[in-house]
Image (cartoon, rainbow, N blue to C red):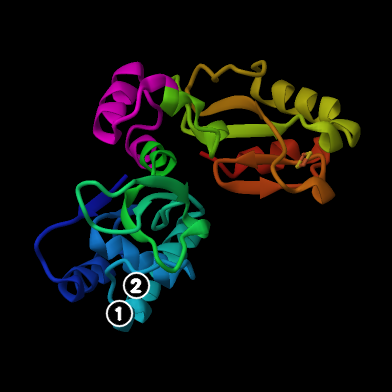
Amino acid sequence: MLRSLLGSEMCIRDRLTILQSLAKNVDQLIVGGGIANTFMLAAGLNIGKSLAEPGLVDDAKAVIDAMKARGQALGDASVAVPIPTDVVTAKTFAADAVATIKAATDVADDDLILDIGPATARRLVQARRRWLSDETMADLGEYLGLTVAELDSIATFGNMIFRKPVGRHVVLVCDSFVCWSLGYAELRAAVEAQLGIRMGQTTPDRRFTLLPIVCLGACDRGPAMMVDADLYGPVDPDGVAEILRGYA
Ligand code: FES
């Protein structure tokens, strides 16, 4: 897997030019610093009064689209530019300014984005390491000024953060009420039989990890499941083998 991180003294236009060519060859582009604000703008998010390059939004969109196209060509939805889902903001850029962690969708017009939020940080670290060990969480907590317990308690995307090693592909079967009433038990049994493992386990070849998950937000498509970032539903238990065949 190829990944690229760019965050330096280069001007944003130079970095975007490099990112556009990298987008054709790498599997993940993690953008940080001021350039991330331009990508948030390109993703349609409000960045308040944070620094960005509105004139380069189309270039950032081109990078996002190129990565998406590469992901589609590879059949891997995780190949993408990860846009922050939470951020640290303040009203002024001052030592005594009060920092607030909020969802990326809640940034107000008078907010300054200072950094990505802890949920995004965990997601990015996991994207590089596949799972988060206690040591990684401690390092992350030190960087973010949070305790490991606080990081663990952050609910956003909590179900997608893995604290133990997982296989190459993660199969998540929704066990919330609607899916449960629409055939969760049969779907779970079919997935377990197909993989030869029980819920919470990883196949011996480390190809799949099977986990339960709360509502995937696709209740009208229950029973629902996800493989990596791909959502399936309603899933006929007889179609499970066909779905899993697509993940080498
Ligand atoms: S209950 Fe399963 S997607 Fe909502």
> Is residue 157 shown above or below 195?
below
Marks 1 and 2: CB-CB under 8 Å? yes
**Residue 78: x %, y % from top left:** 46, 49
Left or right for 215, reference 75 = right
Residue occupying image coordinates x 53% and y 39%: 157
Q: Seen in the image, is 195 located left or right of residue 49?
A: right
Does residue 12 appear left or right of residue 147 in this picture? left
Magenta residues, start to end: 124-149
Residue 44 percent across, percent down from the top left: 49, 70
Q: Residue at x 26, y 64 (%)?
A: 35
Residue extending farthest front: 96
Q: Residue at x 28, y 59 (%)?
A: 92
Residue at the spot of label 1: 56
Instruction: Give the residue displayed 50% in from the left and 26% down from the top.
Output: 153
User: In terms of image quadrants, where is residue 62?
Assistant: bottom left
Please name whichever residue, 150 or 135, is drawn nearer the observer in this view of the structure. 150
Give x and y (percent) for residue 191. Answer: 72, 28
Vertical placement of residue 168 versus 243, above or below: above
Q: How far is mark 1 from mark 2, CA to CA?
A: 6 Å
Which quadrant is home to the N terminus? top left
Ligand 1 has an atom within 8 Å of the beta carbon of the residue at disc 1: no
Residue 146, percent from left and from top: 34, 28
Characterize the magenta stretch by its predominant secondary structure: helix
Residue 60 is tagged as 2
